[in-house]
Amino acid sequence: MFVISIAALRRNTAILREVKEAAGCRLVLALKGFSCWKAFPYINSDLDGCCASGLWEALLARDHFQKHIITYSPAYDEADVAELCGFSHHLDFNSLSQWFRFREMVMAHPRFRSGELQCGLRVNPECSTGHTPIYDPCIAGSRLGITAEQLTGADLTGLSGLHFHTLCEQDSDDLETTLAAVDDKFGHLLRSPQFTYLNMGGGHWITKPFYDRERLIRLVRETKAKYEIEVWLEPGEAIAIHTGVLRATVMDIFESTGHRLAILSVSATAHMPDVMEMPYRPDVFLVEKPETRNQRPDMKEPAVTFDGESYLPAGDPQYSNPQSPFTYRLGGPTCLAGDVVGDFTFPRELRIGDTLVFDDMAHYTMVKTTTFNGVKHPPIALQHEDGRLEVIREFSYEDFRDRLS
């Protein structure tokens, strides 16, 4: 079961509200990272709206968040643009060819003429600061964003914003480096009266304890003053980080060529794909009853906890005892050979029926899950601030069957 903590979500959005108010910018939820709309009423007041990656996310924002909507996609079709013009507030394009194709349609729309709809371009500052190539949109040949060279001599009539998104789980020092590159390559556009907003995208780890929020506030203020424009931020992970868990059951235990294996009721590839794509190693806990361990105030706990349970953290055998008899390779129930979360050392022997908790499973999980192999999809629940658990979605065989019919 996926369980999302409303209290943890609100702690994050309270931090983000304080930051945006201090910086004088606007901040929206990136739906690509977290789009559990049943949670929107609890965080809506702290944020300015949503950013969408296309028509369907934009419709979700319109129907359930009901505030400002920023839409950006690497490509639109004519029907999408026609519908988005009716309710999106920022419509950002990825290429000049897309903008030129739809410019006449967009500029003729009554909402564009009234100023309710503004349009922008995603730019590529060609400044790589990340460490994982699959998440770097500044590599040579990137399909995301327009380079300064491509903009030389272009007719930019009708545009009023620039949008960059180059960060991924990074601190504000990387934003400072990127802003210098943006100024070098696109500063002349931002200084012109035509451009009124700059979208700094997402990837800002604002709610992490180590994140330098004061530097972010300073950078936003300096950017606003330098160009006399409005600044937007669109984090997704910073909103939902450390707010949810995925609870799993141990279904089988056996040995193979010297490895102890535990097959779980959840799958890495189907239910937490960032474990394989990022790659990302989650914190794992073994659920126990309180009387089975010595209570320690320094014992780490997952984002979502329940009365009557204790949580024993699993270790990384690389840094503890590789020969521990309680080290298990955790795998899913699919036929994919690589459907493995990793090797974890537990404080005791695992047993069939044990409950394991995977921490930090609210962002980039539910938005990516699949029904691959017909594996049962975990229910989704909200844990309210009084501890009450509300199951908001359960999945059935019919969901699996009807998806492809």
Image (tube, grey):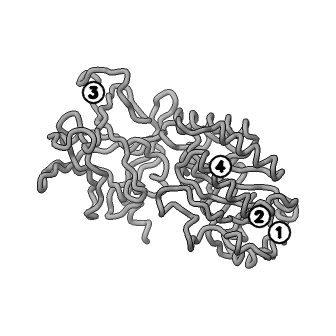
Q: Find residue 264 and report its horizontal and vertical position in percent.
A: 26, 49
Instruction: Choose the circle earlier in sequence order: 4 or 2.
Output: 2
Image quarter in which the C terminus is found: bottom left
Position of 228 compared to 133: left or right? right
Q: Residue at x 29, y 23 (%)?
A: 290
Residue tagged by mark 3? 289
Q: Find residue 378 and report its horizontal and vertical position in percent.
A: 38, 50
Q: Find residue 33 and report its horizontal and vertical position in percent.
A: 53, 52
Image quarter in which the N terminus is found: top left
- The disc at residue 119 is 2
**Residue contact at pointers 1 and 3, CB within 8 angstroms:** no
- The disc at residue 158 is 1
**Residue contact at pointers 4 and 1, CB within 8 angstroms:** no
Residue tagged by mark 4? 176
Q: Secondary structure at mark 1?
A: loop
Instruction: Choose the circle earlier in sequence order: 3 or 4.
Output: 4
Q: Is residue 64 visible?
A: no
Residue type (three-letter) at the residue carrying disc 4: Glu
Q: CA distance from mark 4 to mark 1?
A: 29 Å
Q: CA distance from mark 3 to mark 4?
A: 48 Å
- 122 up-or-down from 21: above or below: below
Q: Find residue 315 and report its horizontal and vertical position in percent.
A: 28, 39
Instruction: Choose the circle earlier in sequence order: 2 or 3.
Output: 2
Instruction: Choose the circle earlier in sequence order: 2 or 1.
Output: 2
Q: Is residue 98 visible?
A: yes
Residue type (three-letter) at the residue carrying disc 1: Gly
Q: Residue at x 73, y 37 (%)?
A: 21
Q: Secondary structure at mark 4?
A: helix
Q: Residues within 10 Å of mark 4 (few under 14, many from 20)?
A: some
